[in-house]
Image: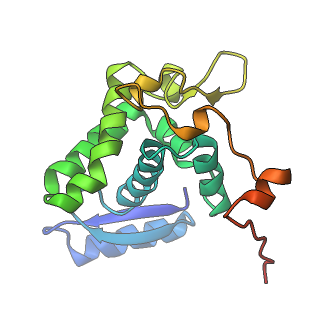
Amino acid sequence: MALVEVIVGSATSDETLARSLDYIQQIHKTPIVVRDGYGFYTTRCVEAYIREGVRLLADGVNPVLIENAGTALGMPVGPLTLADEVGIDVLHHIVSLFRDREHGRWADDKHGAGNAILCRLELAGRFGRKAGRGFFAYPPGEPRHLELGDLDLVWPHGVRPPWRSRVPTLSGQDASRSRFQVRRHRRV
């Protein structure tokens, strides 16, 4: 990763900060200076990206579309893939820590559905890539694939999202009937 977070605490001297920034420049990385606090910068950004992907899943959005939307926005991987890479157990710990520090109805809305999904996956031992199962399955010697067949882990009480009966596509007749338009932008 090209980014290096420099966490400045209350006892961090200017000299220590300057030496840190000099070293980071020498190793050709990009420093970002942040104050000591929960999550720092990258964890907050990564957590938000994953959380919104999981919330979309909880809302019934097709996971293939969630993954494709993430990469279409310029991210190297989709949010569910990143969740598996970080580890569902690690991610659940992070989101629980964030939830404990945030209060009110907005925090309930922000964390409720997503945290519940991560908790159910963790309790089922689906820790992500390191365990061979998370949102994806990682069979030895085979390509990974989405594995949400155990839907009660994601949608309890027998609720099934609409895409389960038919996976939507954006090609052919589906695209012409879609209320969403796919546009390609030229890079300038």
**Looking at the image, how many numbered discs can be counted on the residues?**
0
Q: Residue at x 43, y 34 (%)?
A: 87
Residue sitting at the far right? 172
Q: Where residue 100 appears, x then y in whole percent?
A: 15, 49
Q: Residue furthest bottom?
A: 188
Looking at the picture, tell me which residue is in the foreground, 119 or 129. Answer: 119
Q: Is residue 53 visible?
A: yes
Tell me if 171 is positioned left or right of 36 in this view: right
Q: Residue at x 52, y 48 (%)?
A: 79
**Position in image of residue 181 (x %, y %):** 72, 67
Outermost front residue? 177
Residue 104, located in which quarter of the rendered image? Answer: bottom left
Residue 10 screen position, x and y as percent: 13, 69
Depth order, front residue of 9/147: 147
> Looking at the picture, does residue 96 appear above or below residue 47?
above
Q: Nearer the viewer, residue 180 or 20?
A: 180
Q: Residue at x 40, y 71 (%)?
A: 32
Where residue 9 sits, quadrant-wise, is: bottom left
From this viewpoint, is residue 37 visible? no
Residue 131, placed above or below residue 161: above
Q: Is residue 40 above or below residue 133?
A: below
* Quadrant in the picture for the C terminus: bottom right
Spot occupied by residue 176 in the image (x, y as percentages of width and height): 80, 60
Which part of the image, by quadrant, shows the N terminus?
A: bottom right
Visual colour scheme: rainbow
**In this image, 133 relative to 158: left or right?**
right
Res. 140 image quadrant: top right
